[in-house]
Amino acid sequence: MEKKRGVISERELEIVRLVATGATNQQIAQELMISVNTVKVHLKNIFAKLGIQSRTEVALYAVREGWVELGTPAEAERKLAEVRPPPEEHISLGKRVFLVIAAAAVALLVFFPQVRSEPAPPISSEFVDSGASTNAVDTALQLHRWSAVAPLSTARSRFAVTYYDGRVYAIGGDTSDGVTGTVEEFDPSANSWRVRSPKPIPVHNVGATVLGDVVYVPGGFTDVGEVIADVEIYDADQDSWGLGTSLPVPLCAYALAVVDEKMYLFGGWDGSTYVNSTYEYDPRTGAWSERTPMPTARGFAAAAAIEGQIYVVGGYDGGVEFATVEVYDPSLEGMADPWVVKSPMMARRGGLGVAAIAGTLYAIGGGWNGYLAYNEKYDPIADEWSSFETPVFGQWRNLGVVASNTKIYALGGWNGHYLNLNQEYQALFTHYLPDLP
């Protein structure tokens, strides 16, 4: 053990032990009386020396090597209680119990390998899920900022989801009965769903976004195993479908975002390999253009825009999940490299969903090769990730995530079964002040 500990310095060992408690970079800096930048440098060195990519892996490595000990459940609870909570919310009793359960799960994974090595429910391929439908009430935890709202009528994964004119649209996807073209519309104000006109070409491993006043659904994977280049356009006001300009190449399992009324499509799978391509679509010309490719080829990533830049997060390449965060700035095309790499997520996440609200990026779900006990949010100014609670413990991948003005909706997905859940997360709270005389 001493030989292994000699790989890192005593100062780095102190940081590893604090990371294992769940402390943030700011908390570590305060504890050791060093700067946050110094903490980041040490963490970069630790990642390189240990050959790992995330804070979660640091914590697991430290426990496995005996550098920290969780001890008894009571001791684990005490250690969790010592971690200072984020300033924006008080840790309630329910949340504290949730964290203790998560710590116990980590302990089981570390100390009892037979639990960790138990195979997840089988899937027929990385592009098709399998299993029965599961009722949302039996799956989701009830937490402070999360609320269960009206569930999908069709439990599904690998589907497209978008938000338009105050409503959420779930399109296509994978179900226990196979690939579907079903379209459902959720009205948050009435907390109800209604079925709309189905997508003419049923697909899964697909995304959707709004340009102008219509919804674009590019490419996808059909029920006969074909990756397509067709782009279908849904007019929600008329409840009708039409065809748009086809993709330059067939693609599925891509990431999708919009900046300045242009659509950007990143990576995915072309039927034979995972790609790192970047395509831009301009609805004014109806044309696709190839742009600077991503640094990392991957599919099943997620993307969201913040202040004109697109964050492409996580992903999967058929063998490895990614914690990678790469940011694309369309305004730099033709002048400089439009891509920059940012701090990775704390956990590797393939098949996740992301949403951006008020300059904060929220990453929800994932878990292709492992089990996750939390979601994450990102501060672009500090270039730092922190955790927040998840209503689905374990695998929760190929879900749909979409944002309104203050709320995030996380829908469906797969955790060994197809899920019909519809979870609403209150990201921001609004307060109205009375008019003064």
Image: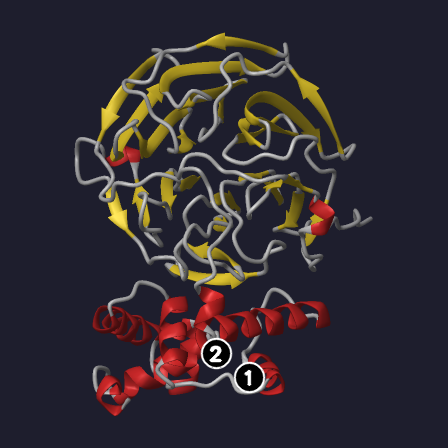
- Mark 1 vs mark 2: which is more N-terminal? 2
Q: Amino acid at mark 1?
A: Lys
Of 173 and 330, nearer the camera is 173
For residue 163, which quarter of the picture?
A: top right
Question: In the rendering, at what x and y percent does residue 337 appear?
Answer: 19, 40
Q: Looking at the image, is 304 positioned above or below residue 432?
A: above
Q: Residue furthest bottom?
A: 2
Q: Are marks 1 and 2 in contact (CB under 8 Å)?
A: yes
Q: Residue at x 38, y 13 (%)?
A: 284
How dense is the environment of label 1, judged by Cα within 10 Å: few (below 14), some, or many (20 and up)?
A: some
> Visible in this render: residue 90?
no
Q: Secondary structure at mark 1?
A: helix
Residue 393: where, in percent of width, then height? 58, 58
* Residue in front for this viewpoint, 278 or 3: 3
| Residue type beneath disc 2 | Thr
Residue 109 x, y percent position in the rendering: 47, 70
Q: Residue at x 66, y 67 (%)?
A: 95
From where the camera sits, is residue 347 visible?
yes
Q: 160 left or right of 95?
A: left
Task: Report whether 85 appears left or right of 360.
Answer: right
In the displayed structure, 203 sits above or below 1; it is: above
Disc tally is 2
At a point 57% along the width and 82% down the height, the residue shown is 76
Q: CA distance from mark 1 to mark 2?
A: 7 Å
Q: Give whichever of 248, 92 is nearer the camera.
A: 248
Q: Which residue is mark 2?
A: 21
Q: Secondary structure at mark 2?
A: loop
Tag of residue 79: 1
In the rendered view, would you say 378 is above or below 77?
above
Give the residue furthest to the right: 437
